[in-house]
Image: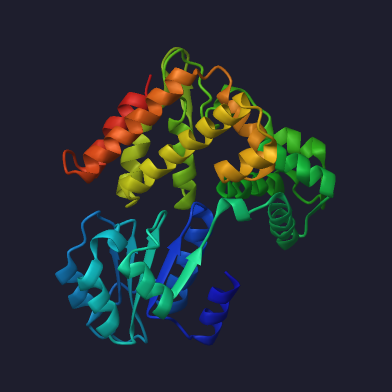
Amino acid sequence: MKEIKKQIKEKSFYKVYLLTGDEPYLILQAKHMLKNGMIREGDTMNYAEFTDAKVDINTLQELAFTYPFFSEKRLLLLDGTGILKTGKDEFVNIMDNMPETTCILICESEVDKRSKVYKWIKKNGYIGEFLKKNQTEKVLLRWIAALLGKEKKQIRENDAIYFLQKVGDDMFQIKNETDKLIAYVGEKEEITKEDIDAITSGEVQDKIFVPFFTTKTAGSGIGLSLCKQIMNQHGGNITVYSEPGKGSKPAALGYYNDLILLKEPPMHILFLIVRQYRILHIISNMRTLRKPDDAIAKTAGIPRFAIRKNEQQLRGYGEKTLERCIEECIQIEEDIKTGKIGDQIGVEALICKLLLP
């Protein structure tokens, strides 16, 4: 991130950027920084987004070879398109020959480092890899202190650790809860354990945003948590309205449709679902084998302190049910990639199977 800030300050950009990893908050921050550093707000003449699984390579080439209009740069964003797998020689040719005034920004949660496109970018462009395993407790505590410091607030280290244990390692959640803390304490400068308890405790309506929390006998309880995570990425918010016996409104499918309108790639939503199931499955299996926390954290790709929160999500979650959910995810991913079903409809079908009662 420091390198990107330096490039923006010096107005010295690479032709191609690849932002990847399993920490979506940092990818989003880097994406916004680069966009704002190159393109004026509202400049639609020199900015274009590609978010579909299939990129029209001819349209991409035409835009890439068009010089900017009253701007130093033209920026093309390819977000969750899978271009590293599908682009190959044609895309490499575009990157090789497009003018220096064009910049291509690629955002992918997963990449094949053996691909020709990846190797080209590694040699000629910039690759930013943002991983959850690098966001250690120490790093997150320092970040929380910085967020509070900007608002002239402070917190003792023990209380900050307590706060982190309560909210987990999701950076969107940490940012959201930190903002709530700042608003809650008002003019008070020091944040205490009592303040943390006040904003993190709650009834079922607070807990429905915790992954795998559910009051129903059927359903995985992942839906609203997933929706909140992605809505936070877009700077949005979710308000829950619930009536006894009728559940939460709007339902998970309503949120999913909102995410689609926000141009969130369906395959990214699928990735987040699969990732959460994978983490829980790893923890469940390794706990059965009595593996130590360090080994579990390394295998699952999460900080050590996050194991406890994930274990709480596993309570009452049968092994067979967990395996069935993973199988459903694998099957729908295969159906999408083989063209049996469209990505948007496919993920919606998965939500109907897993996330709804």
Residue 299 x/y as whole percent: 57, 42
State the residue in front, 30 or 192: 30
The answer to whether 343 appears left or right of 295 in the picture is: left
Name the quarter where the C terminus is drawn: top left
Residue 90 visible to the viewer: yes
Residue pictured at 42% horizontal, 71% vertical: 35
The answer to whether 112 appears left or right of 56 in the picture is: right
Residue pictured at 49% horizontal, 43% vertical: 229
Question: What is the quadrant of residue 67 in the picture?
Answer: bottom left
Q: In the figure, 161 relative to 60: above or below?
A: above
Residue 257 x/y as whole percent: 31, 40
Name the quarter where the N terminus is drawn: bottom right
Number of numbered discs visible in the structure rendering: 0
Residue 296 x/y as whole percent: 62, 38
Q: In the figure, 137 relative to 49: above or below?
A: above
State the residue in front, 326 or 231: 326
Q: In the figure, 46 relative to 175: above or below?
A: below
Residue 62 x/y as whole percent: 18, 77
Residue 50 visible to the viewer: no
State the residue in front, 290 or 257: 290
Residue pictured at 77% horizontal, 46% vertical: 160
Q: How is the image coloured?
A: rainbow
State the residue in front, 289 or 199: 289
